[in-house]
Amino acid sequence: MSGFGAAGELPGWGPDGPSGRGEIFFPEEAHAAAPADFLQELPSYRSVLRRRAGPAGGQDPQGSVGPRAGEARGPQPEGAELAARPVREHALSIAEKRRLRDYQQADIKYLSGWNQWKRTSSKSWKKVLKDIKESLSYLQLWRHDIHSIEGKFGTGIQSYFSFLRFLVLLNFLIFILMFGFVTLPTVISKYGIFNSSFAKISPKSTDSLCTVYTPSGNKGLVYFYTYLKDLLTGTGFLETTSLFYGYYTIDAALLSIMRYNLPLAYLLTTFAYLALSLVWIIKRSVSGFKQSLVHDEDQFQSYCNKVFAGWDFCITDLNAARLKHRSLQYELQTDLEEERIKRKIADRTMKEKLRIYSLRIFLNIIVLAVLSGCFYSIYRATVFSQEKSNNSSSTNLQTNLLVQYLPSMVITLANFVAPQIFSILIRFEDYSPAFEIKLTLLRCVFVRLANIGVLLFSLWSQIHCANDSCKACGYNYELYPCWESAVGQEMYKLLIFDFMIILAVTLFMDFPRMLLVTHCSWKPVQWCGLQEFGISDNVLEIIYGQTICWIGTFFSPLLPAIATIKYFIIFYVKKISLIHTRKPPGRPIRASSSNFFFLVVLLIGLVLAFIPLGISIAHIPSSKACGPFRNFNTSWAVVPDTILGFPTGLQKVLNGIASEAFAVPFFMVICLIMFYFIALAGAHRRVVEQLREQLVMESRDKLFLIRKITEAQKCT
């Protein structure tokens, strides 16, 4: 009712086109003014009266409907705005849009030549950009494959493959950064391409024992299986290539007349790929966060969304449609189960609460015991592997390879066993189905990412020792003359072994199971059926591998290239597995919430990757026998050393920025900005709540009007 003007008109077009003020009107039948007492019977009006009741109550709100109606309309668009906005953006009928288009075309004649050219060029430029964007969409990686998967299996599974494509592109960009700014200048200067050369400064005031580094290269007659072992472990001929940190031993690349500071470039490129990953993940997660806020509504709205807007219109396959029917039924059953559990929780007695809380404490103690067992096993396996790998001259190939891969095998076993135990324990904790899934996933994420941290801690305990053998160089130079390459080899083995496990599961477990289910009619086999394509489990696999890549890129600059190839192959492996050897999940998750969840877990992995990289760069002494930071105590020391070469004024500015006098006010300003945005978010949240209440009130007004019309018809 508030959308009508004083004369009972709606903004639109009149028969004579726009008025002199630039407003547009369209013919509307005259409406008789509604009686004031009838308006006061509306539920929304009574709600306003109740809200205004209080100390300032007693005010007569009569007559406020008109002004509020005018405010609701807002300012009418002027002629310039109408001419500038495209016709498609106006909420008008087709006939009215045609008249508006004719008016805009006629209005161009009265513009100056400059304004005509500006408007025409703006339209042409927008059209060119639109055509370019549409053309580039056809060049998108796996565009047809992902659309086909979306049509057959829905948007939930499609979100996994889109996420996999995002990681392929991210790793490719990281590889371009590391190759362009680190590997390429080193190779060009070492081989004298384009009349280039390099400068190599020997470490000063360093014990000669610390500068001895003899990579375990192959000498003499080498068998074929030795190359295979080196390819799997990163030792031998691979250790002396540009794949690992130890290859980059120059201090500066002299390219024509330019001196390229390789240590500084190495460190800044590391910061650049971490910042690129952080910004890109946050940018992609913003849209998912908005959608998750939209879907975070009360149960009634959730029920309406499932009933009236729950269907996935991208589905074109009959089996996928049946699966979507079952998933919607499962979601409704889950909502009912959650309501039942909420009622059960509300009706619990004190004795029942004590029993369930005691049981949860006991089960969480078991969870901690499982985690402790996994961490201790990884620690012992890593220490044993490092000790035996350096004394492997008398062992055969199989034993040496087994010892090299022992930490990777223990980590993979822990990643498989621990989630199975967690899924069994969660059934006895009496949580709601939705919270069970979230808690289990968080535990699995913690296990996978913490296992990498325990592996690095085990390596650091061997590298940064407190014995007399570490005093000369600051690290265990006898066991690790180039400890950065050793860490890079461990990350390389983790990445390769994770890839082999994914391929082995598909070839030796999923494929034989599919053959048995297809060709064997034995009831137990048919009862087991095909393995479900678990979206969350597959996402955790690739996030685990991506975290390894982020950590290992500093120690192995070309590791992102291997990760790119790995994820490229995994895409086709998972696609074949989904179509032929596995079945879609019976409990699919919403695509919008799954995309946001994937990115949040990936962001957690990135944040956890900052910790070991920060410790390696700023705390552990750099190797004196290899790498670009041989002449520095730590990798971070190259930054203050570079600043010393700047002009005095610039040095003072940078030192002032790094001082406490700048840090404290900067921190206070950041806190004020953060508090402002928190208050702004709270205000937006209250506005959203008011708009929701207004929608509810409008629906009640409609019901009230329908009831009044029905009563009036019965009376007549």
Image (spheres, rainbow, N blue to C red):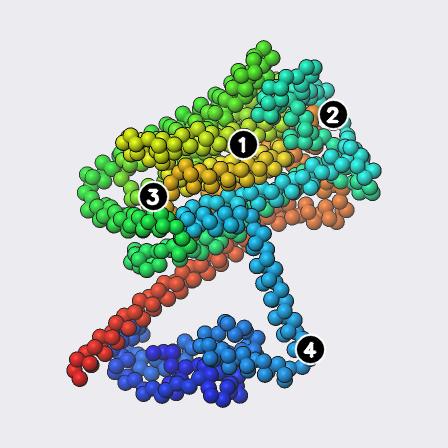
**Label 4 residue SS:** helix
State the residue at coordinates (47%, 35%): 449
Question: Which quadrant of the view contains residue 417?
Answer: top left
Residue type highlighted by circle 1 = Leu
Q: Would you place residue 70 above or below residue 690 in this image? A: below
Residues packed near mark 3 inside 10 Å, few (<14), some (14 to 19) or many (20 plus): some
- Which of the two labelled residues, at mark 4 and mark 3, occupies the earlier sequence position? 4
Q: For this rendering, which residue is in front, 679 or 181? A: 181
Sooner in the amino-acid sequence: mark 1 or mark 2: 2
Q: Which residue is mark 3?
A: 586
Residue 187 placed where, x, y %?
73, 34
Which quadrant of the figure has residue 624?
Answer: top right
The residue where tag 2 is placed is 205
Q: Closer to us: mark 4 or mark 2?
A: 4
Query: Mark 2, residues whose alpha carbon is within 10 Å: few (<14), some, or many (≥20)?
Result: few
For label 4, the residue is 114
In-image side of 474 versus 418 (left or right): right
Asked which secondary structure carries label 2, the reply is: loop
Q: Quadrant of residue 175?
A: top right
Chain-order first, disc 3 or disc 2: 2
Question: Which residue is located at x 38 percent, y 32 percent?
Answer: 515
Q: The residue under label 4 is which amino acid type?
A: Trp
Sequence-wise, which precedes: disc 4 or disc 1? 4
Q: Which mark is residue 495?
A: 1
Could you tell me how many numbered marks the image carries? 4
Q: Which residue sits at x=71%, y=47%?
A: 652
Label 3: which secondary element: loop
Left or right: residue 214 compared with residue 329: right
